[in-house]
């Protein structure tokens, strides 16, 4: 009986632990956002690929576009599309100190980057 009482007291104490009172949406942090557009008319290009990953218009990468883990540093991109000249570029994702995001814990140790890639038609 004593064990049952102790168990109930522990359960009650755990139930009343202070919880996170914030309302959070813990979406995965993006590493890189790439928009691929036509250099002539500014429209999106449905056949675009970034490092061989389909990217029709705009795509969000939470890992490196080559599949590697997300991290600060340079990211080499090769952007291709049918009937367009290919383009290669390097985007630098700067490091940062992780910021406390409340219920979601610490943020990423990088500053998310966005890049617009203009492709010239052939």
Image (cartoon, rainbow, N blue to C red):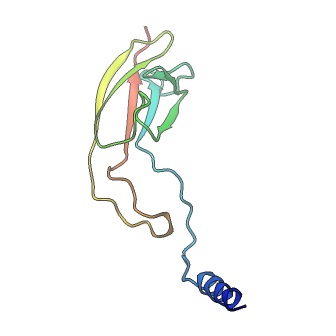
Left or right? Give the position of 81 relative to 111: right
Would you say 75 lies left or right of 82 here?
Answer: left
Q: Choose between 88 and 84: the one closer to the eye.
A: 88
Residue 15 percent location from the top left of the image? 63, 82
Residue at horizontal 32 percent and vertical 52 percent from the top: 109
Q: Nearer the viewer, residue 45 or 22?
A: 22
The residue sitting at 37% across, 47% down in the picture is: 112
Q: Residue at x 64, y 88 (%)?
A: 6
Total count of labels: 0
Q: Quadrant of the C terminus?
A: top left
Residue 57 against residue 87 in the figure, above or below: below
Q: Position of residue 106 (x, y in %)?
A: 40, 62
Pick the quarter of the image with the N terminus: bottom right
Q: Nearer the viewer, residue 66 or 38?
A: 66
Q: Residue 92: image x %, image y %?
A: 27, 38
Q: Quadrant of residue 66?
A: top left
Q: Is residue 74 above or below residue 48?
A: below
């Amino acid at each position: 009986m004593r064990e049952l009482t102790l168990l109930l007291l522990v359960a009650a104490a755990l139930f009343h632990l202070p919880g996170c009172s914030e309302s959070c949406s813990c979406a995965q942090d993006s590493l890189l956002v790439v928009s691929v557009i036509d250099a002539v008319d500014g429209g999106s290009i449905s056949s675009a690929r970034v490092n061989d990953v389909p990217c029709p218009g705009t795509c969000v990468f939470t890992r490196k576009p080559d599949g590697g883990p997300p991290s600060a540093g340079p990211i080499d991109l090769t952007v291709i599309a049918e009937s367009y000249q290919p383009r290669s570029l390097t985007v630098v994702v700067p490091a940062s100190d992780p910021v406390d995001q409340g219920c979601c814990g610490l943020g990423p140790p990088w500053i998310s980057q966005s890049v617009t890639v203009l492709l010239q038609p052939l």
